[in-house]
């Protein structure tokens, strides 16, 4: 999970949509706080593409529970300007992870809030 999250963050910052896509399970869902449910890897990446490269994202895990190929992670995120480091947004996130047959942890469900 840590490796996948690091790949996601690096790919997000360089606006590499193919690398971001690889972090999600084929049947993943994304729950944006202000949008309808987005289903499927391709639809998720298409939606996220507009924000890629515009913010550096830092994740701080608060809790991780794992069982039988699934993991539940919750924590805080912080978006900052990639050039100046100025804060842009912060909030809480929840990710459900699924381990694929190849042992790679991919995002099955991704949601967050944005109170700030």
Image (spheres, grey):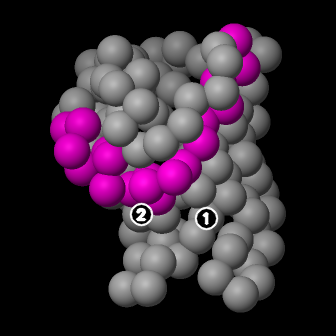
Image mark for residue 4: 2
**Residue situated in front as seen by the camera: 44 or 54:** 44
Pointer 1 or 2: first along the chain = 2
Q: Residue at x 32, y 47 (%)?
A: 21
Task: Determine the secondary structure under disc 2.
Answer: helix
Q: In which quadrant of the rendered image does the C terminus lie?
A: top right
Q: Height in image: 94 above or below 103?
A: above
Quarter of the image for residue 55 reads top left
Judged by depth in the image, the label closer to the viewer, 1 or 2, is: 1
Q: Residue at x 55, y 37 (%)?
A: 39
Task: Determine the secondary structure under disc 1.
Answer: strand
**Chain part drawn in magenta:** 16-34
Q: In the rendered structure, are the residues bearing label 1 and label 2 in contact, judged by CB atoms less than 8 Å apart?
A: yes
Q: Residue at x 46, y 16 (%)?
A: 86
Q: Height in image: 72 above or below 12?
A: below
Instruction: Please give left or right for residue 105 compared with residue 22 in the image.
Output: right
Q: Residue at x 38, y 49 (%)?
A: 8
């Amino acid at each position: 999970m840590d490796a996948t999250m690091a790949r996601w963050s690096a790919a997000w910052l360089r606006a590499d949509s193919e690398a971001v896509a690889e972090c999600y399970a084929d049947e993943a869902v994304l729950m944006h706080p202000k949008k309808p449910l987005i289903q499927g890897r391709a639809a998720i990446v298409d939606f996220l593409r507009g924000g890629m490269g515009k913010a550096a994202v830092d994740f701080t895990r608060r809790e991780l529970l794992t069982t039988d190929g699934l993991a539940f992670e919750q924590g805080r995120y912080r978006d900052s300007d990639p050039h100046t480091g100025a804060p842009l947004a912060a909030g809480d996130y929840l990710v459900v992870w699924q381990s694929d047959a190849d042992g790679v942890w991919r995002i099955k469900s991704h949601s967050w809030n944005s109170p700030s």
